[in-house]
Amino acid sequence: MKNNLIEVKRGLKFFGVQTKPIYKLLQYSSDICIPGVTGSESGSVSFLNSLGIDPKNQKGWKKIADLTQDEQKRLIAGIIMKRNGQVNPGDIFSNNYLLIGEVDDSPFRDAKEFSTLLNSCGRLEKASIGIGACLNDKKMKELAVDNLATYRKEIVNALNWYKDNKDSGKIIRKKNCIIINAEEEVLPTMIGTLGSILSKSVDIEKNIFILSLARNIDDTTKISLRVSGNPDNVNLKEIISKIITKINHGSSGGHIFASGAVIDTDKEDVFIKAALEVMENILIEENIA
C-alpha cells in the first residue's frame, strides 16, 4: 500500500466482482445468503428487476462497476431487506484488495480472484505457470487464465459426477455426514474443492460433515473433510487426526475449517468405518452438551 501497488476498498462480500455479471454474483454467492435469490438464476434476475436495475446494458450482462451510485445503493438496500430476519442481515460487506497495476475485468485485479487463479494452477499441477503469473510474465498470465478455464471445467465435471451418483453406493448419507468415494472419477487434487463447494451449498443442511475420497495414481487415496455452515465449535483437523489414529495408518493435516489425509487405497473401507464411528460420537457429544 505504501508503494501504491494495492488498494483496499470496502464493498459487497461477493467473489468475482471484477469478472462476473451481477446476477451471477447473486446466484452463486456463498458468503451472502439471500432467500429466494441465492442458488437461482431466474431468482437473481428477477431480484434485480424488482429493484429497478436492468441486469443488462448494450455490452451485455452488467457487472458491479456498471451500476450507477443510485443503483448500487438500491442493490445494497434490497439485499439487506431480503435478508431481514437472518442473523446480522447487514453483514454483507468486506474488504476488497485490488492490485492497482491490473485493469478492471481482469482475474488479476482482485487479490481473491488472483488467489483462485493460482490455486487452479496448483490443483492442475501447473505450478510453474502460477509462478510465472506472479512474476508478471505476460505469456504465463495468459496461460494461467486458460488454465483457470480448464479448472472450472474440472469443477463442473466433479459436481456433475456427484449429482449423477447421489443415489449410488459411492455416496453414503447418514444423519450428520455425507461420505463421497469418487475413486478414479474425480481428480484427487479436486476432491477438496468438491467438498468445499458442497459445504456451502444451500441444498445441504448446516453442521453436516462432508468426507470426500479420490484415488491417486500411486495406490493411495486423498481424503478431504469439510463441514457445512462452518460452525466455530468443530475442529476438522482434530477430527481427521482421530480417524487416522483409530486405524493406525496414513497421515493427516489441515486446519480447523478444512482438513485432509492420505491413506493406502486398500484401507478405504477401514477408514470409512472408523470415520463413521468418530463422527457419530461427535454428534452424540454435541447433543448431550
Image (cartoon, helix red, strand yellow):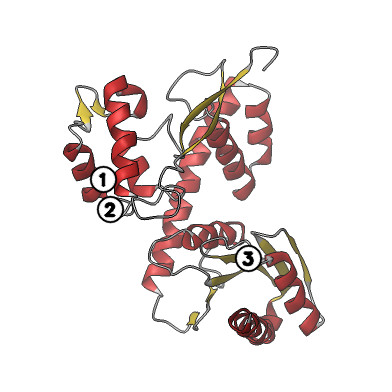
Tell me the residue that label 3 is attached to. 224
Confirm or deny contact between disc 2 and disc 1 (CB under 8 A): yes
Tell me the residue that label 1 is attached to. 44
Residue 273 or residue 40, whichever sits in front: 40
Residue at image point 65% right, 82% down: 285
What SS does tag 3 mark? Answer: strand
**Occupied quadrant, residue 233:** bottom right
- x, y percentage for residue 183? 56, 73
Find the distance from the CA under tag 2 to the CA under tag 1.
Answer: 6 Å
Find the distance from the CA under tag 1 to the CA under tag 3.
Answer: 31 Å
**Occupied quadrant, residue 52:** top left
Dot 3: within a 10 Å radius of its alpha carbon, few (fewer than 14), some, or many (20 or more) residues?
many
What SS does tag 2 mark? Answer: loop
Find the distance from the CA under tag 2 to the CA under tag 3.
Answer: 28 Å
N-term-proximal mark, 1 vs 3: 1
What SS does tag 1 mark? Answer: helix
Identify the amino acid type marked 1: Ser
Camera-side mark, 2 or 3 = 2
Residue at image point 43% right, 29% down: 18
N-term-proximal mark, 2 vs 3: 2
Identify the amino acid type marked 3: Ser
Is residue 21 visible in this depiction of the protein?
no
Tell me the residue that label 2 is attached to. 40
- For the N terminus, the quadrant is top right
